[in-house]
Amino acid sequence: MRQIFLDTETTGLSAEGGDRVIEIGCVELLHRKLTGNNLHFYLNPERDSHEDALRVHGITNEFLKDKPKFAEVVDQFLEYIEGAEVIIHNAPFDVGFLNKELELQGRPRFHTFVDGITDTLVMAKEMFPGKRNSLDSLCDRLEVDNSGRTLHGALLDAELLADVYINMTRGQDALLMEVESNDQQTRSAVRVDLSSYQLPVIAATEQEMTQHGDVLLQLDKSSGGHTVWRKLENSVAQ
């Protein structure tokens, strides 16, 4: 599965009010492994950033003057994201701005180019109800190093989001098993008689059972209630 983590920086908060995208950062994950095939643009928005936005991202109007306009990179951008699942934190904001940029170029809306859009803010609210779920808060909670994030930047934020997502979905390798086989290689096994051994049975402590239950609950929330043990519980109850 090809997944793209995407973030934007903008001149302000209102795409419909004339604000524009000034930075796009994309990070590629293929089969849950970072590939290094990232995409990053600074863009000339042909307007100034609001002071509040400038304090957030620190990208000056002067810096953007010689950067390409969205029209100059749109084909490269759409080719890069085509057919991927795109993962965004607070997706309606970024997608709204991208839709407006595409509309200005006479292009279809963003969702028509991708396989799907996943909002990690929605995921985080389901996993951590009642808690702060900003990207910084998730980095702190999931022990993702964000010490280099003094200002918002689209590529850096996309990279942090990839790390956060991997941790939210139980780590990069937690749900994967790579089985290597060689049909030409024969393997021999030595039979061992274990009948004379008395193996101790160590019961889980109450604290361990509680922690185990918490893990199962979070996995169940992440899967939308489609975990195997939940199905087994329902079948037994019936």
Image (cartoon, rainbow, N blue to C red):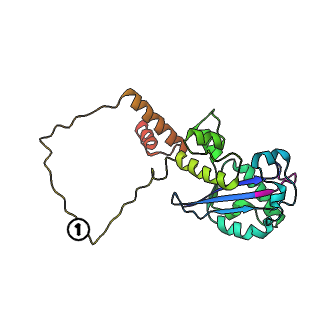
Image quarter (top left, top right, bottom left or bottom right) of the C terminus: top left
Task: Give me the residue at 78% from left, 55% from top.
Answer: 97
Q: Is residue 193 within the magenta segment?
A: no
Q: Quadrant of residue 2?
A: bottom right
Q: Residues within 10 Å of mark 1 (few under 14, many from 20)?
A: few
In this picture, is 101 found above or below 226?
Answer: below
Magenta residues, start to end: 15-22
Q: Is residue 18 within the magenta segment?
A: yes
Left or right of 37 in this view: 100: right
Q: Dominant secondary structure of the magenta stretch? A: loop
Task: Give me the residue at 84% from left, 56% from top.
Answer: 61
Q: Nearer the viewer, residue 45 or 110?
A: 45
The single residue placed furthest to the bottom in the displayed view is 184
**Where does the image place residue 117, in percent across and percent down from the top left?**
65, 55
- Residue underneath mark 1: 186
Task: Give me the residue at 72% from left, 58% from top.
Answer: 24
Left or right of 208 in this view: 107: right
Query: Is residue 162 something that shows in the picture?
Result: yes
**Where does the image place residue 6, in percent across and percent down from the top left?**
66, 56
**Where does the image place residue 55, in percent across and percent down from the top left?**
79, 45
**Where does the image place residue 82, in percent across and percent down from the top left?**
65, 66
Q: Quadrant of residue 222?
A: top right
Left or right of 108 in this view: 174: left
Query: Is residue 223 something that shows in the picture?
Result: no
